C-alpha cells in the first residue's frame, strides 16, 4: 500500500474505519456517553480563524521547540494510547519506531500491549541521532507497590518524563465498549501489568487494568512520586487554572490540558477552550520553564497552529496515530506524522511565521 496516496488524516481514518472490527473501532473512536465533549473538542478549533500576515521571508520554516529544557524537531507528540496491537500486530514497537524516525516525541502508555522495556529498545534503535525524547504515561494503580514498580521500570528504561494521567479516577462510560463488552482478544495483554495478573486469562486484562485506577489519587501523591523518580512529572488531564497552579505547587514540570479525547467526563469543557485559562493562571505565577501542552481533536496542521498561537508549547495527537497504525503499521504512522508536519509548515509559511516563536496570539481572531 502506497502511503503517499493518503493526503490527509481523514483519508487514513476512512480506510482504518473500514478495516477494523466493530468493537475495536468503537473502542478507538468513541467518547463518553452522549459524546458531547468529543464533538466539542473539534468544534473549539473551528471557532478561530487565522489572521495571517504576508511578505515575511518564509524560505525556511523551522518547527523546532524547547520541551522540558531540550530541543526537539517538532511540537507534535504522540499521545499515550492503550493497546496498539489492536491496530497492528507490531503494536507499540511500530508506533515508537515511526515516532523516532519522524523526530516526534513518543509517550508510551501504562496500558501498552508491549512491555515498556521493548518499546524503549525499538524507539532507541530508530532514534539514530538521539534527538527525540520518549516519555512514559502512568496510570496510578490502587496497589501502590505496582505503581512504584512501574515508575522504577520506566526510570530504569530511560524514559525522560513521567506523564501522570489525572482524569481517570474512574472510567468514563463509553457506551460502545459497554454494549460490545469490549475486551482484549486472546494473546493480547496489558503487558506492563502482566506480572500483576499472572495466571489470569488474557481476556481478564482489560477489565483488570481499567478496574485498577486509583480513585483516591490526590495532589499529595505527586510529591511521593517525585521521591521515587528522577523523571520530571507532567500532569495530563488538567482543564482549570487553579488545578494548574496546584500542579506547580506539587512540583510538576508541566501539564497537558486534556479531557482524554472526550472519553471521560461527558459535557466537560473542550480542551482548546480550557487552554487560555490554564495559561493565564500559570503566567500569573511566572513559573519559569513550566510547559503547557494540549491535546484533543487535532486533525490538521492548522489545528496545531491555533493551539500554538493560543500559547501551548506543543500538542499531542491521539486517534490519528491509531488510524495510521491500522492502515500501514510503522509506515502508516510515519505518514500521519508527515501529513501533520507538512500541513503545519505550510500553514506557518502562509501565515508569515518562519518559526514557532512567531506564531503569536494576534494571528487568531474569532471565526
Ligand atoms: C486514549 N487516551 C489515553 N490517555 C492516557 O493517558 N493513557 C491511555 O492509555 C490512553 N488510552 C487511550 C486509548 C484510546 C483508544 C484513545 C482514543 C485515547 C487519551 C489520549 O492520550 C489523548 O488524550 C486523546 O486521544 C487526545 O484526543 P484525540 O487526538 O484522540 O482527539
Image: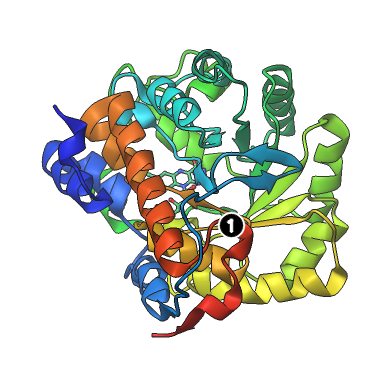
Q: In front here: 98 or 197?
A: 98
- For the image, the number of numbered tags is 1
Q: Is mark 1 within 8 Å of ligand 1?
A: no
Q: In front here: 238 or 216?
A: 238
In the picture provided, is 4 more to the left or to the right than 340?
left
Q: Quadrant of the C terminus?
A: bottom left
The percent position of residue 235, horizontal first and vertical second, equals: 68, 51
Q: In front here: 282 or 269?
A: 282
Specify the color scheme: rainbow
Q: Quadrant of residue 328?
A: top left
The percent position of residue 127, horizontal first and vertical second, equals: 54, 20
Q: Secondary structure at mark 1?
A: helix
The percent position of residue 74, horizontal first and vertical second, equals: 54, 44
The percent position of residue 275, horizontal first and vertical second, equals: 59, 70
Q: Residue furthest bottom?
A: 366
- Structural crowding at the residue carrying mark 1, measured as other residues with C-alpha within 10 Å and reported as few (<14), some (14–19) or many (≥20): many
- Classify 357 as above or below 134: below
Q: Residue at (84%, 52%) from the top-left corner?
A: 220
Q: Quadrant of the N terminus?
A: top left
Q: Quadrant of residue 274?
A: bottom right
Q: Residue at (69%, 70%) from the top-left corner?
A: 279
On the question of residue 362 being in view, the answer is: yes
On the question of residue 297 being in view, the answer is: no
In this figure, which residue is indicated by the disc labeled 1?
356
- Classify 82 as above or below 280: above
Q: Residue at (43%, 53%) from the top-left corner?
A: 345
Q: Residue at (67%, 27%) from the top-left corner?
A: 159
Amino acid at each position: 500500500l502506497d502511503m503517499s496516496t493518503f493526503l490527509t488524516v481523514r483519508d487514513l481514518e476512512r480506510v482504518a474505519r473500514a478495516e477494523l472490527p466493530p468493537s475495536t473501532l468503537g473502542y478507538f473512536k468513541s467518547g463518553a456517553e452522549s459524546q458531547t465533549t468529543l464533538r466539542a473538542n473539534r468544534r473549539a478549533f473551528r471557532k478561530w480563524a487565522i489572521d495571517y500576515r504576508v511578505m515575511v521571508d518564509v524560505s525556511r520554516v523551522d518547527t523546532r521547540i524547547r520541551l522540558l529544557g531540550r530541543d526537539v524537531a517538532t511540537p507534535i507528540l504522540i499521545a499515550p494510547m492503550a493497546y496498539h496491537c489492536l491496530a497492528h500486530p507490531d503494536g507499540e514497537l511500530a508506533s515508537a519506531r515511526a515516532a523516532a524516525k519522524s523526530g516526534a516525541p513518543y509517550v508510551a502508555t501504562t496500558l501498552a500491549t508491549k512491555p515498556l522495556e521493548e518499546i524503549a529498545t525499538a524507539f532507541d534503535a530508530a532514534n539514530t541521532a538521539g534527538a527525540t525524547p520518549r516519555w512514559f504515561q502512568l496510570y496510578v494503580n490502587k496497589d501502590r507497590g505496582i505503581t512504584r514498580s512501574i515508575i522504577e521500570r520506566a526510570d530504569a528504561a530511560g524514559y525522560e518524563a513521567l506523564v501522570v494521567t489525572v482524569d481517570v479516577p474512574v472510567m468514563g462510560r463509553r457506551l460502545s465498549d459497554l454494549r460490545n463488552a469490549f475486551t482484549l482478544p486472546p494473546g493480547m495483554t496489558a503487558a506492563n501489568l502482566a506480572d500483576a495478573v499472572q495466571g489470569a486469562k488474557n481476556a481478564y486484562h482489560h477489565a483488570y487494568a481499567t478496574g485498577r485506577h486509583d480513585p483516591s489519587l490526590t495532589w499529595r501523591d505527586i510529591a511521593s512520586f517525585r521521591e521515587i523518580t528522577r523523571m520530571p512529572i507532567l500532569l495530563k488531564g488538567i482543564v482549570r487554572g487553579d488545578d494548574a497552579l496546584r500542579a506547580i505547587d506539587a512540583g510538576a514540570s508541566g501539564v497537558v490540558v486534556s479531557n482524554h479525547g472526550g472519553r471521560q467526563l461527558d459535557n466537560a469543557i473542550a480542551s482548546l477552550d480550557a487552554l487560555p485559562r490554564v495559561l493565564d493562571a500559570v503566567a500569573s505565577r511566572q513559573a519559569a520553564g513550566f510547559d503547557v501542552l494540549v491535546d484533543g481533536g487535532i486533525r490538521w496542521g492548522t489545528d496545531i497552529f491555533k493551539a500554538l498561537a493560543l500559547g501551548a508549547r506543543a500538542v499531542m495527537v491521539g486517534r490519528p496515530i491509531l488510524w495510521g497504525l491500522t492502515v500501514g503499521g510503522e509506515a502508516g504512522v510515519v505518514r500521519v506524522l508527515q501529513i501533520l508536519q507538512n500541513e503545519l509548515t505550510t500553514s506557518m509559511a502562509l501565515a508569515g511565521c518562519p518559526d514557532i516563536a512567531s506564531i503569536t496570539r494576534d494571528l487568531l481572531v474569532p471565526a
